[in-house]
Image (cartoon, grey):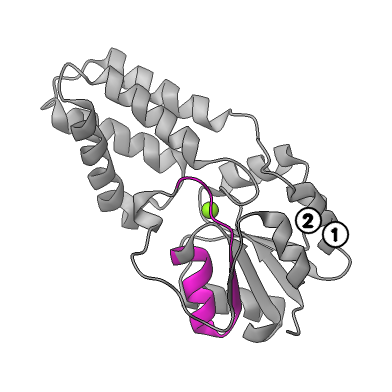
Amino acid sequence: MSIKVVAFDADDTLWVNEPFFYETERKLCALLEDYLPHHTVSQELYRMQIQNLPLYGYGVKSFILSMIEMAMSVSEKTISLDVVEKIIGLGKEMLEKPIELLDDVEHVLHSLSGRYRLVVATKGDLLDQERKLKKSGLEHYFHHIEIMSEKREIDYRKLIKHLDIEPEEFVMIGNSLKSDVLPVLTMGGHGFHVPFHTTWAFEQIDHRIEHANFKEFTSLKEVLAHL
Ligand SMILES: [Mg+2]
């Protein structure tokens, strides 16, 4: 491998993210239990999120809007403003969460810096991701931060063009096979998968990946043996 740039996904690769969404969803279920059983609230929320993705994109702000819209819809617009206020409060709580770095992140970044250009490539709200990166204390390790609306092959091609490298000089490390690995392999880059214990349904795929440029690890520090 002649790697020049090592790119990291952020949410559930560098720091904890998805569990906060589940935690909020559980609180939302409790708020709406007069209207619907918990599992139905979860299903309806997922449906609303996916429906709104093309308009709102990823991240907490769009999650807040989807929670409110879903609550209005399942209550047939009888939900009180008090509940709407609570939902907005749940969202703000998410935005103010402290950063919980995952194991060995600092060690891995420290070991790779100086040998490679390190990059963050993440989806989500621009302001929220910038805030998280600042709070994480990791910003100084990165040569470039790319906050992307989508992680498709075309989006990665734009990124490597901007970085002025060839696909085979790029490795992407992340917890999502669908967003962090598959499009990068298709482009001709390298994809390293470090699974997190929980993955949002939308990011799941149902087939195994067999590819010469693909590697899977059980912990982030294992990537050091290959870089
Ligand atoms: Mg992720």
- Vertical placement of 212 versus 159: above or below? below
Q: Is residue 21 left or right of residue 40?
A: right
Instruction: Please tell me the numbered disc located at residue 108.
Output: 2
How would you rate the neighbour count of disc 1 (Cα within 10 Å): few for under 14, some for 14-19, many for 20 or more?
some
Task: Report the residue at 70% width, 44% height from top.
Answer: 103
In this figure, which residue is indicated by the disc labeled 1?
Answer: 111
How would you rate the neighbour count of disc 2 (Cα within 10 Å): few for under 14, some for 14-19, many for 20 or more?
some
Q: Label 1 near label 2: C-beta < 8 Å?
A: yes
Q: Gap between marks 2 and 1, in whole Å?
A: 5 Å
Q: Residue 71: percent from the left, percent from the top?
A: 22, 29
Position of the N terminus by quadrant:
bottom right
Q: What is the span of residues highlighted in magenta in the rendered image? A: 178-198
Q: Tell me if residue 184 is in the magenta stretch.
A: yes
Secondary structure at numbered mark 1: helix
Amino acid type, label 1: Ser
Task: Report the residue at 15% width, 25% height from top.
Answer: 36
Task: Report whether the residue tagged 1 is closer than 8 Å to ligand 1.
Answer: no
